[in-house]
Image (cartoon, rainbow, N blue to C red):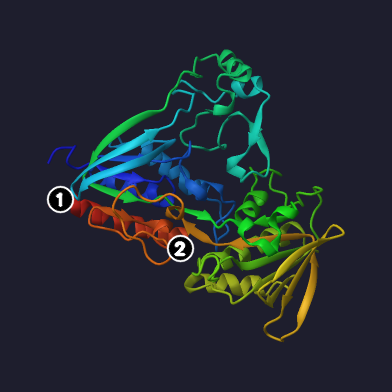
Amino acid sequence: MTDQDKKILVVGGGISGLTAALEAAEAGHEVVLVERNPYLGGRVAQLHQYFPKLCPPYCGLEINFRRIKANPRLEVLTMAEVEAIKGEPGNYTVTIKQRPRFVNEKCTACDKCADAVSTKIKNPFNYGLNEVKAAYLPHELCYPYRYVIDPCIVGEEDGKKAAEACPYDAVNLDDKESEITVEATAVIWAAGWQPYDPLKLETYNFDKSPDILSNVQFERLAAANGPTAGKVLKPSDGQPPKSVAFIQCAGSRDENHLPFCSTICCLASLKHSTYVREQYPDSEVTIYFIDIRAMARNEDFYTRVKADEGVKFVKSKIARIETEGGKLVLEGENTATGAKFKAEHDLVVLATGMQPSTAENKIPADIAYDAYGFPISTDGIIACGTVRSPMEVANSTQDATAAVLKAIQTSVRR
């Protein structure tokens, strides 16, 4: 078999895609990894800590980035999206759209382009919680370690300033969108997940107060490289919250929204409660839940958080959130006692569920989906990780390895 015969395409550069691409390349196959963001790592790169060990994700990501650099069989395309997949198992032609970065490989991340521009955009890495210059490094340990020029300043005065300020001729404002064709024996679809849109939860009034956050936003709020340098503060006034509420199943297990359980939301909120309590020992945390799901090795983590006297668990599906006098008022029913209640909090975090990326961006091939919108794998197009089913990081890496074995079998059968 030639190298071309052994080429495997991996779509998605999150933890599942990274694992799949590296495992396939280290098994001797030529691999092309396609990622739509300007950096690899996906949502794992945006985490402050993993559960249950509460360790940072960067150490594991950095090891994977070193493995990429050391493997000549692996080609990485960032800011790229698959537009079409044609053919059959063992013989696919894949069309990829490559968007312009406007910064080439000469970039040393010296920051001079950012210093030169004044235009700001919402920071996508921090889920829009703060702003960043329109010439920016995605995050401190990004791969590739290279700046991005936002299209909004290309053709504008700020774009010219960015190009003139670069001492290495790395800013290329003439960069254009291009099309790439890859011949592949198999496609591993590891395009990940997206948070359920909290604006769809109309009674929670997400857009009425900056102190109502989604769980992914709260994760960035607590991160050392986040918008507040790791301090959990109220976005409305920059003050520490004295009372924080976490609302579980915000849109999940609901036939009007996501009818399935996303499996990680309970654990994420348990983890988030530790962020608050460690910074503010006098604070109060309330977790409003239907039931807590913390299986296997995570049961001990739940027990540990529950032992904290500053964390209260209320069995309730919150019906409404209102803003009254600078406070957030939650209305609900305690389903353990039957009593209706109102509770005031300074900060509210919605544990929104995991939607597969295919909920909005379908795989451009003849693929079936289950009742919840998750793709069903075929012999040659194999879904893995959170695009296939809700799961945590450890399960995602295992699922990616299984996907690689199926992809290799397809290649060998050819």
**Residue situated furthest bottom in the rendering:** 337
Q: Position of residue 361 (x, y in %)?
A: 43, 49
Location of residue 370 (image quadrant): bottom left
- Residue 80 in sight here: yes
- Judging depth in this view, the residue of 412 and 25 nearest the camera is 412
Q: Amino acid at mark 2?
A: Pro
- Mark 2 falls on what kind of element? loop
Tell me the quadrant of the picture where the N terminus can be found.
top left
- Judging depth in this view, the residue of 385 and 254 nearest the camera is 254
Q: Residues within 10 Å of mark 1 (few under 14, many from 20)?
A: few
Q: Position of residue 213 (x, y in %)?
A: 68, 55
Q: Is residue 327 above or below residue 45?
A: below
Q: Position of residue 251 (x, y in %)?
A: 58, 65
- The residue that mark 1 highlights is 412
Q: Position of residue 98 (x, y in %)?
A: 39, 32
| Count of numbered marks | 2
- Look at 45% across and 63% down and name the residue there: 390
- Judging depth in this view, the residue of 28 and 32 nearest the camera is 32
Q: Amino acid at mark 1?
A: Val
- Judging depth in this view, the residue of 80 and 229 nearest the camera is 80
Using residue 254 as the reference point, say whether residue 143 is left or right of it. Answer: left
Using residue 211 as the reference point, say whether residue 260 is left or right of it. Answer: left
Q: Residues within 10 Å of mark 2 (few under 14, many from 20)?
A: many
- The residue that mark 2 highlights is 390
Location of residue 196 (image quadrant): bottom right
Q: Is residue 116 above or below residue 183?
A: above
Q: Are marks 2 and 1 in contact (CB under 8 Å)?
A: no
Question: Disc 2 to disc 1, how far (Cα)?
Answer: 30 Å
- Look at 61% across and 76% down and name the residue there: 290
- Residue 274 in sight here: no
- Look at 75% across and 49% down and name the residue there: 235
